[in-house]
Each structure stands twice: as C-alpha cells, then as structure tokens.
Image: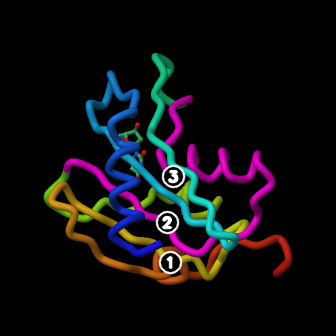
Amino acid sequence: MTDHQLLALAKDAMKQAYAPYSHFPVGAALLCSDGTVYTGCNVECASYGNSICAERTALCKAVSEGERSFLTLAVIANTDGFCTPCGICRQMLNEFSPDLRVLCANKEGEYAAYSLKELLPHAFSSDDL
Ligand code: THU
C-alpha cells in the first residue's frame, strides 16, 4: 500500500461524510500493521458536540474489528492547506500507535507527512504518572 493509494482511499471515504452543519467533509484511511485498511468519514449530529471526526471513525472501525496496531493514517479535506487531525484524534491514535505516520492532504491530493510524535509531543499517558 503506497501513500498515494492510501490517500486515494481517504479521498473516496470523504464522499460518505455526513456534514450538514459544518459543510466540511473529511475522509481518512488507516493502514493496519497486518496490511488491512479501514476508512472513515466525519459524522455530525444536530447536537454538534456529538459529532465524530473521520480519523476516529476509521480508528474505531478498525479497533472494533480486533486491530490494535497501525502504520499510517491518511487524512484529506477540500482545503487549500493540509488537513491535520484534531487534538482528540491525536490522543486516541496515540493510545494504539505512538509511532504512527500521518499523511495530511489538501483538495489537490498534495500532502505533508508527519509522525504522530511531531503532532502530539508530550502526549498524555497514564503510564508516566
Ligand atoms: N473534522 C474531521 O473529521 N477531522 C479533522 O481532522 C478535523 C475536523 C470534522 C469534524 C467536523 O465534522 C468538521 O470536520 C468540522 O470541524
């Protein structure tokens, strides 16, 4: 699975976004250590705070199928700049794979690659306490 293939899956998943409130569709594709890919989109709710991001949709789909280890996440939105995961998603991704690679794309499919450690330095871990 190449970065471009994973980004293409994220772009496809963005089509399923349910974003009638923000009008900000997002797609994600998560590559598991065993090679399986789970995709996700954002799903909003009239009670806005209940909405879930594309990244956590993909993560929860994967975890609920028994996956626990992830290599790369691709995220895409219809933006000029690169779409990066929100803080809640970063912390949840860190729960399973602190060494995750994160590909953050724009509407052209151009992207920047980050490590999750770059995006979430000094992540909270109950192990450290
Ligand atoms: N959103 C995501 O799905 N992922 C991100 O990385 C940023 C934000 C969603 C949440 C909400 O449905 C909409 O985008 C606007 O914030």
Nearest to N terminus: mark 1 or mark 2: 2
Residue 108, given in percent of the width and then of the height, sits at 15, 60
Q: Is residue 8 left or right of residue 46?
A: left
120 relative to 21, above or below: below
Residue, disc 3: 55
Mark 2 CB within 8 Å of ligand 1: no
Rendered residue at 28%/64% (across/down):
105
The relative height of residue 14 versus residue 102 in the rendered view (above or below) is above
Q: Residues within 10 Å of mark 2 (few under 14, many from 20)?
A: many
The x and y percentages for residue 18 are: 40, 27
The quadrant where residue 81 appears? bottom left
Q: Residue at x 30, y 76 (%)?
A: 112
Q: Residue at x 39, y 53 (%)?
A: 10
Which residue is tagged 2?
A: 73
Residue type at mark 2? Leu
Give the CA separation, mark 1 to mark 3: 13 Å
The outermost residue toward the top is 46
Residue 42, magenta (yes or no): no
* Callouts 1 and 2 close, C-beta under 8 Å: yes
Tell me which amino acid carries mark 3. Glu
Q: Quadrant of ligand 1?
A: top left
Amino acid type of the residue that numbered disc 1 sits on in the rendered structure: Arg
On residue 101, the disc is: 1
**Disc 3 within 8 angstroms of ligand 1 (CB):** yes
Secondary structure under badge 1?
strand
The C terminus - image quarter? bottom right
